[in-house]
Image (tube, rainbow, N blue to C red):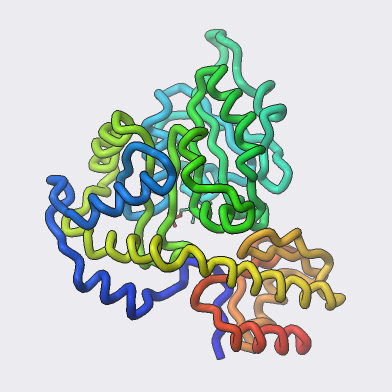
């Protein structure tokens, strides 16, 4: 048995999703004529209380478009030091937007208004102009830690007072919503931009949407074209996204339950030094031996995991992990 816990990006489309893709009505989306893409963009925007959306090939692209829309060259953005936009987007902040990055030390990636306020540069020719704050929810490197909306509200107020834009890297926003019980519709009140991945926990094969006001999305279409992300009959992919939004949100709680089960098991073993608090579908744990050593041992039992540091290993739960696979994993942990 193979149990692939490396990432929630490894899922394959279900039969229902494939049927939806196969039956999609499509057109040339660069001409704005793909009705399935248009309806995905409208649907995602309305879920989050935003005016408009744009469908893109990846979450990296939606984040990079957001940064391009919300900054000018020579500006600075503020993000946590674990932020995906900084660590895992290939230096795109500097390359695409000519913007510098001020990194903060959040609590497992979670920032507060008090942490951000002193890092906003005063008006002075020496200092880059701080124009954007990027939050991530859930925080990937925080072990799937999440913000409650009540924690976001003071940050949004600060950004408004200081004239900064606020962008959400919501690659796993639905995982956060399932845990916090906050409502997606309320997010639109606080963020200028929201990026949502359809190909993580929601199980679509490709795609992310960037949500914002109409003006910003109009400009984002120009930026997407420049980045090479203007797709043609993309409705076949958008159909998978619509299917995911309609059928795969409520089931995320199963992934979270599986994560809790595995975390409880991991804590029993002396080769595990510590397990980060598990809030959603990600488990990050510290090992006594080197992480690559442990990952190799897992592989002997068909369990695929990622080492995320010299002594840290990550499991990510997702919709292709069955109860049987969880049983197999629990049995295998005993043999490590
Ligand atoms: C996966 C991910 C993204 C986007 O990644 P793509 O692979 O480009 O779709 C963005 N932010 C976070 C936190 C992620 O985990």
**Residue 321 in the figure: left or right of residue 284:** left
Of the pair 148 and 300, the residue shown nearer to us: 148
> Which residue is drawn at the image coordinates 78% and 87% (left, top)?
334
Quarter assignment of residue 150: top right
**Residue 205 in the figure: left or right of residue 9:** left
Task: Note whether residue 306 is visible.
Answer: no
> Which residue is drawn at the image coordinates 45% and 67% (left, top)?
248
263 relative to 325, above or below: above
Q: Position of residue 310 (x, y in %)?
A: 71, 62
Task: Note whether residue 222 is visible.
Answer: yes
Report the label total: 0
> Which residue is drawn at the image coordinates 40% and 37% (left, top)?
66
Of the pair 73 and 53, the residue shown nearer to us: 53
> Which residue is drawn at the image coordinates 38% and 36% (left, top)?
212
Quarter assignment of residue 198: bottom left
Q: Position of residue 78 (x, y in %)?
A: 58, 31
Of the pair 200 and 294, the residue shown nearer to us: 200
Q: Quadrant of the N terminus?
A: bottom right
30 relative to 250, above or below: above
């Amino acid at each position: 048995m193979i149990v692939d816990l490396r990432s929630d990006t490894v899922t394959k489309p279900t039969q229902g999703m494939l049927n939806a893709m196969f039956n999609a009505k499509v057109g040339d989306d660069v001409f704005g004529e793909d009705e399935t893409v248009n309806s995905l963009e409208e649907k995602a925007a309305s879920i989050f209380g935003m005016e408009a959306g744009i469908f893109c090939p990846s979450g990296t692209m939606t984040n990079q478009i957001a940064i391009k829309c919300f900054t000018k060259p020579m500006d600075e953005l503020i993000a946590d030091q674990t932020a995906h936009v900084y660590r895992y987007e290939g230096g795109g902040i500097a390359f695409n937007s000519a913007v510098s990055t001020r990194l903060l030390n959040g609590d497992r990636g979670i920032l507060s208004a008090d942490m951000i306020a002193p890092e906003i540069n005063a008006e002075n020719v020496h200092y880059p102009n701080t124009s954007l704050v990027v939050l991530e929810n859930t925080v990937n490197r925080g072990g799937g830690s999440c913000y409650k909306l009540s924690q976001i509200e003071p940050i949004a107020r600060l950004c408004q007072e200081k004239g900064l834009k606020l962008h959400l890297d919501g690659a796993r926003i639905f995982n956060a919503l399932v845990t916090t019980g906050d409502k997606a519709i309320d997010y639109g009140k606080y963020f200028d931009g929201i990026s949502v991945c359809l190909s993580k926990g929601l199980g679509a094969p490709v795609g992310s949407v960037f949500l914002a006001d109409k003006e910003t999305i109009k400009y984002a279409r120009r930026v997407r074209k420049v980045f090479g992300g203007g797709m043609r009959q993309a409705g076949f992919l958008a159909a998978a996204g619509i299917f995911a939004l309609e059928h795969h949100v409520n089931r995320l709680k199963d992934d979270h339950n599986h994560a809790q089960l595995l975390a409880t098991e991991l804590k029993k073993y002396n080769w595990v030094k510590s397990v980060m608090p598990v809030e959603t579908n990600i488990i990050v744990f510290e090992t006594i031996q080197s992480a690559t050593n442990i990952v190799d041992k897992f592989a002997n039992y068909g369990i695929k995991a990622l080492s995320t540091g010299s002594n840290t290993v990550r499991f990510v739960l997702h919709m292709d992990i069955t109860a049987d696979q969880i049983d197999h994993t629990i049995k295998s942990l005993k043999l490590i």
